[in-house]
Amino acid sequence: MSMAQRLLVLACSRSAGEALAALEATGQTLPPDVTWVNLPCGGSVDVLHILRALEAGAEKVWVLACYEGACESLEGNRWAEKRVQWVQALLQEIGLGPERVVFRAISPTMAADLKAWLEEE
Amino acid sequence: MIVAERKPMVEILASIQGVSRLLVVGCETCVAVCLAGGAKEVAVLSAALRLALRERTSAVEILERSVERQCEEEFNAPLAEDIAKVEAVLSMACGVGVQTLAEQFPDAIIYPALNTQFMGRPEAPGIWAERCLGCGDCVLGRFGGICPITRCSKSLLNGPCGGSSNGRCEVDPEHLECAWQLIYDRLARLGQLERLYAIEPPKDWRSAHDGGPRRTTREDLRL
Ligand code: SF4
Ligand code: SF4
């Protein structure tokens, strides 16, 4: 696998995926060096997905999932955040910046915030 | 099961310093169940090592394997070809698995990637706790199925000590229940409290590791 990409986004399709769809409905597109992967739920993010992405050359990985209490699978968002924290600790242990992996809570209505985050990154 | 946890990455990285071809081998039995050393953990550790070594030194080639039970030579035999190709092996099995590889492949350099901790069970998701010290002369039948040797911080056979308070052990009240409270409650429930009138004699520790390394022989299984 090769991924000379700046940013990989692992996204809960029910929150972040909807926000992206709303953004795209306004004619916006993702920057070319951003790879977006919709997952059924934040809970399906695995530490290995994140590590493999970094190994393949992604500079940063974002995990976007629902706000506390908003996950349709109840706790998928909390698992997603836990897994991000676990990878951050591992990166710290091996001397890489934990900031390369970021967890963010998002809702389907946050297209404008998503746009701003992408511009800031 | 045998419970283990991954060693700190600095220690693992120090052990394989200078190695350019490495085999990481997991075990699909106890350490896979306690999420420390199965195929998944082999993949995660190997990915972490590739990331760490990419930043620091020249490229390292890492082979990833996992066997059904690393403590039995039959399951390790298919590793021979891979072991011949690498400079070192990082075993994610318990100490028994690591030693089996070392005995079986006398010319291979084998490093442990885990710290083997205890015989225990998962108490809740993400929490494993010790239950048996392998004393070789099990007393569970006299103590309501609760091991005073393993679960009492002082291994008291005629407990409790004076530090038992509100069901907690004085050694670590936050995390440890008093084993003797558990024993009392369980025997009460079973209607066997009279067992506690018996004074337990000093334990003969020769059946435990104190008597030296142990082995079991079953003549009926030998020709
Ligand atoms: S009495 Fe001995 S064999 Fe039985 S559970 Fe305790 S340590 Fe293990
Ligand atoms: S408080 Fe209970 S478990 Fe702790 S040392 Fe005393 S008798 Fe053993």
Image (spheres, grey):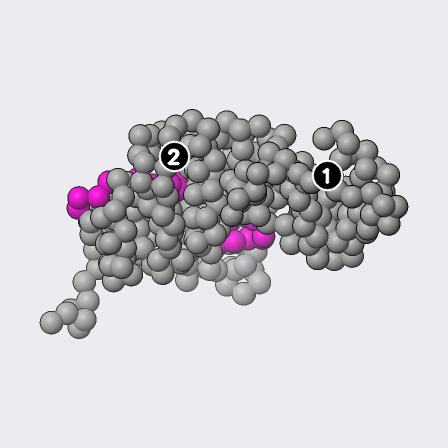
Q: Residue B180 location, x and y as percent?
A: 50, 48
Q: Give yes or no for residue B127 being in the magenta stretch.
A: yes
Which part of the image, by quadrant, shows the C terminus of chain B? bottom left
What's under tag 2, amino acid-wise?
A: Ala
The residue at 69%/54% (across/down) is: A39
Observer-side mark, 1 or 2, equals: 1
The residue at 86%/39% (across/down) is: A112
The residue at 77%/32% (across/down) is: A119
What's under tag 1, amino acid-wise?
A: Pro
Q: Is residue B96 visible?
A: no
Q: How crowded is mark 2: few (under 14 residues within 10 Å), some or many (20 or more)?
A: some
Q: Mark 2 lies on which chain?
A: B
Given the current orientation, which residue lies at the most extreme left position?
A: B223
Q: Give the range drawn in magenta.
A: B106-128
Label 1's element?
Answer: loop
The answer to whether the residue bearing label 1 lies less than 8 angstroms from the nearest atom of ligand 2 is no
Q: Name the residue under label 2.
A: B59
Which part of the image, by quadrant, shows the N terminus of chain B? bottom left
Q: Residue B220 location, x and y as percent?
A: 17, 73
Task: Please tell me in which quadrant of the rendered image residue A53 appears.
Answer: top right
Label 2's element?
Answer: loop
Q: Residue B126 location, x and y as percent?
A: 56, 48
Mark number displayed over residue A113: none
Relative depth, front residue between A113 and A87 = A113
Q: Residues within 10 Å of mark 1 (few under 14, many from 20)?
A: few
Q: Is residue A34 left or right of residue B95?
A: right
Q: In this view, does B28 lie to the left or right of A51?
A: left
The kind of secondary structure the magenta stretch mainly shows is: strand
Q: Name the residue under label 1.
A: A31
Q: Mark 1 lies on which chain?
A: A
Q: Residue B166 location, x and y as percent?
A: 62, 43
